[in-house]
């Protein structure tokens, strides 16, 4: 098997970002979904994935650079010297190592679980690397959940179920949807980082949401039932008489889903909006409205 640096086409001193970029470039070119029936491309894709499984993990990369594991991920056998077996030779025992594969690295190493398979196949099998992606969703999608088809940079698609109440920065794991394993090993996972986009109507404050709703001067003075948007659909809200701009009303349980299975609340901020063109009747009323002349809200 080729040196993983050579397989990915990067220098030994390459950064982790350069290694990731090189792998994605190869994966996009060689992915089986983009090259159906092309066995050569599939083998190259597997080799690139196997190389990335080592170099894409900083701990495994360090072990490879120190010579503790080889290009397949299997542990390198320690060099032994005559003095280590002098006592056995003195007693007539034949030079041997009864430990079998026990010399291949620490038993707690991730590859130790594959040593029994390596005895029969002559090569280790191990899980493919995880692949990371970023997905942008609307606030409504995050609140209500849904299904999305995600197009991958390497080619192909993933069918993703978005759970209701997913948060910005949360990572969804799709098991077995990452890089293919080596030597029949299991595939890695796809890790989808959720990014919740800002919403023009709602702002999120913990589990609560806040929205501004315009009302007419008539509705503000006399009160009314007005239609208000929520994350789960429109509802009607009672505006009490004599409501001013900035008055805040609560819609209980109409906020964002929380971890306890419930929802936060929605806070509706009222804003009085006059009609676009002047109204002669309204102007006349305001001109002759004596009580209005004496009211100074700035002083209050």
Image: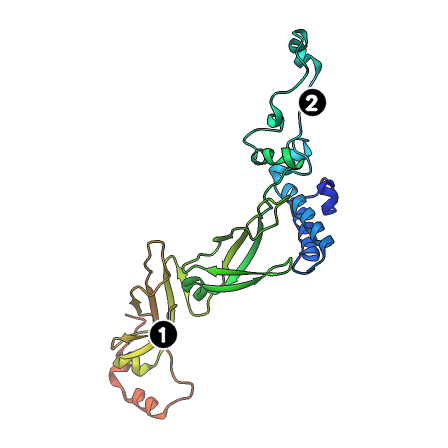
Dot 2 alpha-carbon crowd within 10 angstroms: few under 14, some 14 to 19, many 20 or more: few
Q: Is residue 18 visible?
A: no
Q: Residue 38 sits in which quadrant? A: bottom right
Residue lying at 24% horizontally and 82% vertically, measured from the top left? 291
Task: Verify CB contact (< 8 Å) between mark 2 and mark 1.
Answer: no
11 or 191, which is in the foreground? 191
For the N terminus, give its image quadrant: top right
Residue farthest along the front direction in this orientation: 120
142 or 93, which is in the foreground? 93
Residue 21's spot in the image, x, y percent? 67, 51
Numbered disc 2: secondary structure:
loop
Residue lying at 51% horizontally and 58% vertically, measured from the top left? 195
Residue 246's spot in the image, x, y percent? 34, 70
217 or 215, which is in the foreground? 215
* Label disc, if present, on residue 154 of the rendered structure: none
Q: Residue 127 sits in which quadrant? A: top right
Q: Is residue 279 above or below residue 205?
A: below
Dot 1 alpha-carbon crowd within 10 angstroms: few under 14, some 14 to 19, many 20 or more: few
Q: Is residue 254 left or right of residue 168?
A: left
For the C terminus, give its image quadrant: bottom left
Q: Is residue 221 above or below residue 204?
A: below
Q: Is residue 3 visible?
A: yes
* Label disc, if present, on residue 234 of the rendered structure: 1
Residue farthest along the top direction in this orientation: 90
Q: Residue 275 sits in which quadrant? A: bottom left
Residue 76's spot in the image, x, y percent? 67, 30
* Label disc, if present, on residue 79 of the rendered structure: 2
Residue 251's spot in the image, x, y percent? 30, 67
Residue farthest along the bottom direction in this orientation: 280
Sequence-wise first label, 2 or 1: 2
Numbered disc 1: secondary structure:
loop
């Amino acid at each position: 098997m080729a040196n993983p640096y050579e397989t990915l086409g990067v220098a030994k001193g390459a950064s982790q970002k350069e290694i990731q970029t090189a792998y994605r470039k190869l994966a996009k070119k060689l992915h089986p979904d983009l090259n159906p029936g092309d066995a050569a491309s599939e083998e190259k894709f597997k080799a690139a994935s196997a190389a990335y499984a080592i170099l894409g993990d900083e701990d495994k990369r360090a072990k490879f650079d120190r010579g503790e594991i080889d290009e397949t991920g299997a542990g390198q056998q320690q060099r032994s010297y005559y003095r280590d077996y002098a006592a056995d030779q003195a007693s007539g025992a034949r030079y041997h190592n009864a430990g079998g594969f026990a010399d291949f690295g620490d038993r707690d190493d991730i590859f130790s679980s594959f040593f029994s398979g390596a005895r029969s196949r002559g090569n280790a099998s191990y899980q493919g690397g995880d692949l990371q992606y970023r997905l942008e969703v609307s606030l409504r999608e995050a609140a209500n959940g849904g299904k999305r088809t995600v197009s991958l940079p390497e080619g192909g698609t993933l069918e993703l179920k978005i759970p209701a109440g997913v948060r910005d920065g949360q990572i969804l794991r799709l098991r077995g949807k990452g890089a293919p394993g080596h030597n029949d090993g299991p595939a890695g996972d796809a890790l989808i980082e959720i990014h919740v986009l800002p919403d023009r109507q709602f702002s999120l404050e913990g589990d609560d949401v806040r929205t501004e709703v315009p009302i007419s001067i008539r509705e503000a003075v006399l009160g009314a039932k007005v239609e208000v948007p929520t994350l789960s659909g429109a509802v009607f809200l009672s505006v009490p008489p004599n409501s001013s701009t900035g008055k805040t009303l609560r819609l209980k349980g109409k906020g964002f889903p929380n971890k306890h299975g419930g929802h936060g609340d929605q806070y509706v901020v009222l804003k009085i909006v006059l009609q676009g063109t002047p109204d002669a009747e309204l102007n006349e009323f305001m001109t002759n409205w004596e009580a209005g002349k004496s009211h100074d809200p700035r002083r209050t």
